[in-house]
């Protein structure tokens, strides 16, 4: 990635709240990461977040219901394998983040830091939200990196984004108690109607801001969708003491 293309991508992220970088990761590396994730899924290697833990629409009622052990996230991806941590701290990510934040980047182990697995049966949809809703840092300026390990389309539950929503100011009434952006309000609907779902191929990466409104549908295909997701911030933007964001160490790289 040249400095020129990085600057263009960062400009797009700043304008729209997200940017897709096609083919950032090789098919071979993606295949290896996916194979590791498939193995860990079969082994149900802890720590895991189950669909039944969150119970978003489409998820099983409980762990004892049919599909109750459907995995939503293989948590703590950074500690799961050297291949996962190498991608998290890859030189191309470091260079990108350093240019975006204008200072040394930090990887947060408290947020995302997971392999998202969206299953055809019992995989839930995720309503409109900003990731920062449960995050606590000095500034709401963090960027997540979503690596597609297979194709991601509307049919298998790809992400939807509202362009420009990262810089919109909303009153708290625009969100429900769980801090989802209320889709029953006409003023919210007007924004949601402008959403786009960029189609991703294996090795494509989406960088998105922690304030960008996004959602994702169910997986209507026959295959599990795998995406490796990490979140970064600038070194000076520290997590607030005592918060969940401060509960795990930051990684300097
Ligand atoms: O894949 C999904 O269902 C959405 C994931 C998401 O938006 C998130 O984890 O913040």
Image (spheres, rainbow, N blue to C red):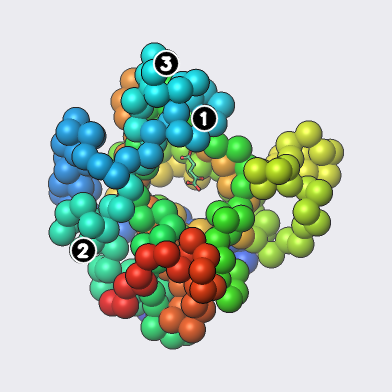
Mark 1 neighbour density, 10 Å: few (under 14) some (14–19) many (20 or more): some
Image quadrant where residue 119 sits: top left
- Local crowd size for mark 3, using a 10 Å CA cut-off: few (<14), some (14–19), many (≥20): few
Residue 110 spot, x, y in % from top left: 41, 60
Residue at the spot of label 3: 65
Closer to the camera in the image, 13 or 236 = 236
Instruction: Work out how far the residue at label 2 is from the one at label 1, CA to CA, in angstroms.
Output: 32 Å
Mark found first going from the N terminus, 3 or 1? 1
Is residue 130 in sight in this rendering?
yes
Relative height, residue 8 to residue 181 (above, below): below
**Residue highlighted by disc 2:** 86
Frontmost residue, 163 versus 174: 174
Number of marks in the rendered image: 3
Task: Residue at 62% x, 47% y: name it.
Answer: 129
Distance between the alpha carbons at the discs numbered 3 and 2: 37 Å
* Category of crowding for the residue at label 2, using alpha-carbon neighbours closer than 10 angstroms: few (below 14), some (14–19), many (at least 20): few
- Say whether residue 142 is visible: no
Mark toward the viewer: 2 or 1: 1
């Amino acid at each position: 990635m040249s400095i020129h293309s990085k600057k263009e991508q960062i400009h797009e992220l700043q304008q729209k709240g997200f940017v897709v970088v096609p083919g950032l990761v090789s098919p071979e590396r993606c295949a290896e990461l996916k194979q590791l994730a498939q193995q860990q899924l079969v082994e149900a290697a802890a720590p895991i977040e189950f669909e039944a833990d969150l119970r978003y629409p489409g998820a099983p009622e409980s762990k004892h219901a049919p599909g109750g052990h459907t995995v939503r996230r293989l948590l703590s991806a950074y500690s799961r394998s050297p291949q996962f941590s190498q991608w998290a701290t890859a030189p191309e990510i470091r260079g990108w983040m350093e240019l975006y934040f204008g200072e040394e980047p930090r990887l947060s182990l408290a947020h995302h830091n997971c392999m998202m697995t969206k299953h055809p049966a019992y995989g839930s949809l995720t309503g409109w939200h900003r990731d920062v809703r449960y995050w606590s840092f000095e500034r709401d300026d963090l960027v997540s990196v979503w690596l597609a390990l297979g194709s991601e389309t509307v049919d298998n539950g790809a992400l939807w984004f509202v362009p420009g929503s990262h810089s919109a100011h909303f009153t708290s009434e625009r969100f429900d108690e769980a801090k989802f952006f209320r889709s029953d309000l006409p003023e919210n609907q007007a924004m949601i109607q402008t959403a786009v779902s960029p189609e991703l191929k294996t090795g494509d990466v989406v960088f998105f801001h922690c304030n960008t409104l996004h959602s994702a549908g169910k997986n209507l295909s026959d295959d599990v969708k795998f995406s490796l997701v990490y979140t970064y911030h600038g070194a000076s933007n520290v997590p607030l003491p005592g918060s969940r964001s401060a509960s795990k160490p930051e990684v300097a790289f």
